[in-house]
Image (tube, grey):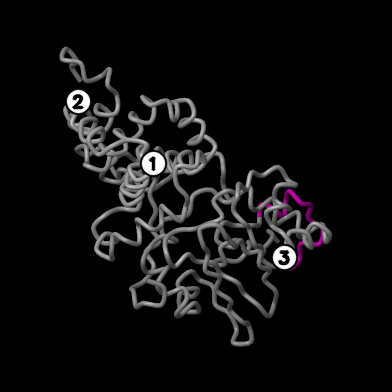
């Protein structure tokens, strides 16, 4: 990437969403606990190829890399992840509901 | 204007990102799943995650600005900062973690700027999280190829007699620019000087503010 042609630097910014802050925190905590290193985070990012930098946002790439590293470190299995993902996605259609198990009860009316 | 809801601006004046209130995305559900598994397994706790978010939120360019201002008023601290910026920052109570922090000094002959061409390495422990533009492909690609053109986009125009040095950060080696102290600040104290130090002046894409006349 360094040295390639590219357009003007976009100066617009955005406030980090809660899920992005949580990804950042999980990366710092899990690397601090020794499950992987910053180099491990970057290895997966580099392996994604250039397409990922066009199609995924910054913290989307990070959460994908954190996940890959944690599975490689044996913290959880792909099976455990698949089951939890299904459970989360069944809770609701937006982040706030899906991130809050107690809100996803059958009698919940938003 | 920042409080005009019709414009969908956040309190900081930035537009809300669409995925803040849109349908649950696959990667958001991935974040929830990973976090809950780690909590279920006792690897971390909700309190620990929140404490880490709070610690990161508390960091801001004001921290780096205090370090810069100290270097401007205290020649011995400046020497220690240029020798070992991690240790000098820790002296002031900042948690720098394991990464090696290197301060590079701007003078009237040398202008330094920092980039991370591979991803987004940034002196986050002193400046907080990097601005979005620091992470863009455009900045990362062009900073090392045509730094003067990039600086011009940020409004920084340097004479031909000024050498531009671009420092490419790595995972465990981070740079911070020690900007040159502005003119006409001889009577200002450390606290007032710190208010002249902008985030971009510590990345090298800006210059410190001039004192009010």
Q: Residue at x 16, y 12 (%)?
A: A107
Question: Could you tell me residue B6's position as x and y percent?
Answer: 28, 41
Q: Which residue is mark 1?
A: A23
Other-residue count near label 3 (Cα within 10 Å), few / some / many at <14 / 14–19 / ≥20: many
Q: Residue at x 32, y 35 (%)?
A: A76
Q: Secondary structure at mark 3?
A: loop
Q: Closer to the observer: label 1 or label 3?
A: 1
Q: Tell me if residue B6 comes above or below residue B73 in the rendering.
A: above
Distance CA(mark 2)–CA(mark 1): 20 Å
Q: Outermost residue, top direction?
A: A107
Q: Are marks 2 and 1 on the same chain?
A: yes
Q: Which residue is mark 2?
A: A91
Q: Which residue is mark 3?
A: B181
Q: Tell me if residue A99 comes above or below residue B11 in the rendering.
A: above
Query: Magenta stretch?
Result: B181-195
For marks 2 and 1 on the same chain, the one whose residue lies earlier in the sequence: 1
Q: If the image is split into quadrants, where does the C terminus of chain B sit?
A: bottom right
Q: Secondary structure at mark 2?
A: helix
């Amino acid at each position: 990437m360094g040295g390639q042609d590219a357009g003007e630097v976009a100066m617009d910014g955005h406030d980090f969403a809660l899920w992005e802050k949580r990804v950042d925190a999980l990366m710092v905590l899990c690397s601090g606990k020794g499950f992987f290193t910053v180099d491990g985070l970057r290895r997966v990012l580099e392996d994604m190829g250039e397409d990922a930098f066009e199609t995924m946002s910054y913290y989307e790439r990070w959460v994908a890399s954190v996940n890959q590293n944690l599975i490689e470190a044996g913290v959880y299995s792909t099976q455990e992840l698949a089951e939890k993902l299904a459970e989360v996605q069944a809770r609701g259609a937006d982040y706030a509901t899906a991130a809050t198990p107690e809100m996803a009860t059958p009698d919940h009316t938003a | 204007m920042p409080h005009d809801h019709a414009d969908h601006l956040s309190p900081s004046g930035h537009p809300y990102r669409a995925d803040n209130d849109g349908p649950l995305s696959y990667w958001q559900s991935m974040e929830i799943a990973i976090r809950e598994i780690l909590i279920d397994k006792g690897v971390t706790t909700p309190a620990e995650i929140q404490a880490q978010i709070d610690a990161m939120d508390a960091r801001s360019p004001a921290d780096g600005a205090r370090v810069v201002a100290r270097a401007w008023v205290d020649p011995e601290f400046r020497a220690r900062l240029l020798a070992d910026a991690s240790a000098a920052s820790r002296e002031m109570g900042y948690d720098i973690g394991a990464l090696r922090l290197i301060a590079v000094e701007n003078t009237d002959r040398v202008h330094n700027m920092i980039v991370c061409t591979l991803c987004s390495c940034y002196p986050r422990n002193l400046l907080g999280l990097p601005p979005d533009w620091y992470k863009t492909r455009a900045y990362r690609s062009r900073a090392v190829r045509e730094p003067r053109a990039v600086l011009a986009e940020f409004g920084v125009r340097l004479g031909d007699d000024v050498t531009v040095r671009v420092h490419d950060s790595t995972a465990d080696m981070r740079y911070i620019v020690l900007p040159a102290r502005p003119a006409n600040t001889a009577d200002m104290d450390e606290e007032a000087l710190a208010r002249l130090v902008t985030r971009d002046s510590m990345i090298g894409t800006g210059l410190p503010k001039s004192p009010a006349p």
